[in-house]
């Protein structure tokens, strides 16, 4: 009887150690994943995905949707419509044809600096392709690209 209890305690000890090891590994993975991508970068990634989805929608419908949830889904891609802080990203079509995606940063208010800075991605699309893209975080221009000129320089075919 005593020998059986020792075996049981030994098995419970091994199970407990295994459980602690698994919990430690899962906790490490969770912390690694949350620290890799800063909130601003995660929001920019979602905005780029929205930009491509909007370009596809524009090609089919010749207008932007009333609601971002109407955009087509892309397989194995980010199909989110919210920024890192779980607020819906704004979609605005300007009179000159420029389409603007905007997140108001961590505080959810217009303006701000650092993590509170607004994130704005402006673009033009033609035939399902992006012709122009401008990314601004606060007052800083992070990226500006005229894809039409780039395609001409690289001698890539024009959109159909």
Image: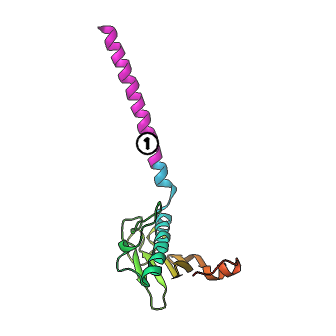
Q: Residue at x 29, y 8 (%)?
A: 1
Given residues 159 and 150, the one toward you in this image is 159
Across and down, in percent, residue 114 comes to: 48, 69
Q: Mark 1 — residue?
A: 26
Residue 69 rendering spot, x and y as whole percentages: 36, 71
Judge from the rendering whether residue 19 lies leftward or rightward of residue 35; answer left or right: left
The kind of secondary structure element at disc 1 is helix
Instruction: Please indicate, yes or no, whether residue 133 appears anywhere in the rendered image.
Output: no
Q: Return the residue found at the far bottom.
A: 95
Tell me where the magenta segment starts and ends, as one range: 1-30
Residue for point 38% across, 75% down: 109
Q: How many marks?
A: 1
> What percent of the width, then of the height, locates residue 132?
57, 81
Instruction: Write down the quadrant of residue 159 in the picture.
Output: bottom right
**What residue lies at 41% left-to-right and 28% top-to-bottom?**
17
- Asked whether residue 9 is drawn in magenta, I would say yes
Taking the image as shown, residue 107 lies to the left or right of residue 42, namely left
From this view, report whether residue 76 is shown above or below residue 21: below
Quarter holding the C terminus?
bottom right
* Residue 37 in view: yes
Q: Which of 61 and 140 is in front in this view?
A: 61
Q: Which of 136 and 74 is in front in this view?
A: 74
The image quarter containing residue 54 is bottom left
Residue 39 position, x and y percent, is 46, 63
Magenta stretch prevailing secondary structure? helix
């Amino acid at each position: 009887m005593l020998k059986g209890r020792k075996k049981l305690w030994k098995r419970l000890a091994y199970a407990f150690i295994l459980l602690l090891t698994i919990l430690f590994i899962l906790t490490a993975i969770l912390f690694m994943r949350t620290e890799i991508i800063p909130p601003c970068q995660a929001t920019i990634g979602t905005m780029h995905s929205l930009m491509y989805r909007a370009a596809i929608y524009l090609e089919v419908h010749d207008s932007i949707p009333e609601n971002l949830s109407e955009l087509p889904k892309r397989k194995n891609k980010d199909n989110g419509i919210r920024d890192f802080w779980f607020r819906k990203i704004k979609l605005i079509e300007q009179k000159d044809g420029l389409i603007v995606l905007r997140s108001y940063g961590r505080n959810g208010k217009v303006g701000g600096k650092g993590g509170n800075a607004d994130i704005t991605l402006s673009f033009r699309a033609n035939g399902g392709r992006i012709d122009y893209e401008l990314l601004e975080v606060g007052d800083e221009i992070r990226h500006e690209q005229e894809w039409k000129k780039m395609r001409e320089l690289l001698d890539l075919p024009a959109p159909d």
